[in-house]
Amino acid sequence: MRPFLALSLILTATPTLGAGPNPSGPIDGIYIHFADAGLLTDCRSGKRVAVATEADNAALERAYLASATQPGAPLWVSLLGHVENRPRLEGGGREDVLVVDRFARVEQGRGCARHAELHTARWKLVRLDGRPVATEGTPPFLQFNPAQGRLTGSSGCNRLSGEYRSWGPNGFTVLPLATTRMACPGTLAEQETRFVGALSRATHRIQAGTSLELLADGLPVARFEAEYLR
């Protein structure tokens, strides 16, 4: 049996990434690489972790760079690996890091098999430009209508609406948005500006589990969690 086929057949028995100290096991997820750093979003849990630059990481990087159609484009990958909790390289504290014990394959045009579809949920914004969302006011959210190619939602202060384009497993862009004009308190006004800016810059999406993350040329800019699943 071919190695990557064997990996696929046992994926369902694999513990969720980040659920505790994990032995080496098969993992599939969406991988991005930018600025000499790699991040992987686990397809089962939606958890995102940094990838350690050791073990078989070099094989993963080579395969990604040979397959990516543009810098920072998300690609589905399969590998054997394990998670270690280590001190952060910057900023103090600790973080989970994925160690790639054996790279298996990378595949264009494929996304996570287990994820909430855009139109089945209200997507609550939980992180923006790597920072938690302000807790006061209405939580920012988006809802999608694929049949019309439209989105609606809230910035946390004003209503917003417009058109979006989604293609393949990871392609995503938002056309210029219309918003209401209610004055917002200082913190919410600043967050609204950053939120609308992040949507306008989005070039890709990653859907895994109940999470949706928007990327701008390889950099994660907005992360959402699904609510009101139908």
Image: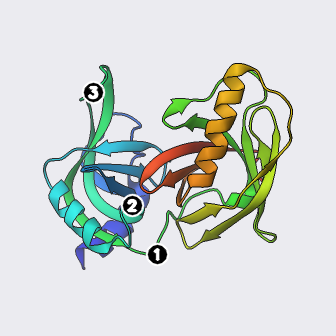
> Mark 3 to mark 2: distance in Å?
33 Å
Q: Position of residue 192 (x, y in %)?
A: 69, 35
Q: Point out the residue furthest to the left here.
A: 55
Q: Which residue is mark 3?
A: 90
Q: Which residue is mark 1?
A: 109
Answer with the quarter of the image where residue 67 lies.
bottom left
| Residue 11: image tag | 2
Are the residues at dot 3 and dot 1 in contact (C-beta closer than 8 Å)? no
At 56% from the left and 37% from the top, the residue drawn is 128
Of callouts 3 and 2, the N-terminal one: 2
Name the amino acid, label 1. Gly
Q: Is residue 29 left or right of residue 61?
A: right
> Mark 1 to mark 2: distance in Å?
19 Å
- State whether residue 188 is above or below residue 54: above
Of callouts 1 and 2, the N-terminal one: 2
- State whether residue 59 is above or below residue 108: above
Name the amino acid, label 3. Glu
Q: Position of residue 227 (x, y in %)?
A: 72, 43
**Label 2: how many residues lie within 10 Å, few (<14), some (14-19) or many (20+)?**
some
| Residue 202: image tag | none
Q: In front: 186, or 79?
A: 186
Q: Position of residue 228 (x, y in %)?
A: 77, 45
At 75% from the left and 53% from the top, the residue drawn is 177
**Label 1: how many residues lie within 10 Å, few (<14), some (14-19) or many (20+)?**
few
Q: Is residue 120 left or right of residue 219?
A: right
Q: Is residue 172 left or right of residue 186?
A: left
Of callouts 3 and 1, the N-terminal one: 3
User: Helix, strand, or loop for circle 1?
Assistant: loop
Residue 31 visible to an observer of this rendering? yes
> Mark 3 to mark 1: distance in Å?
34 Å
Name the amino acid, label 2. Leu
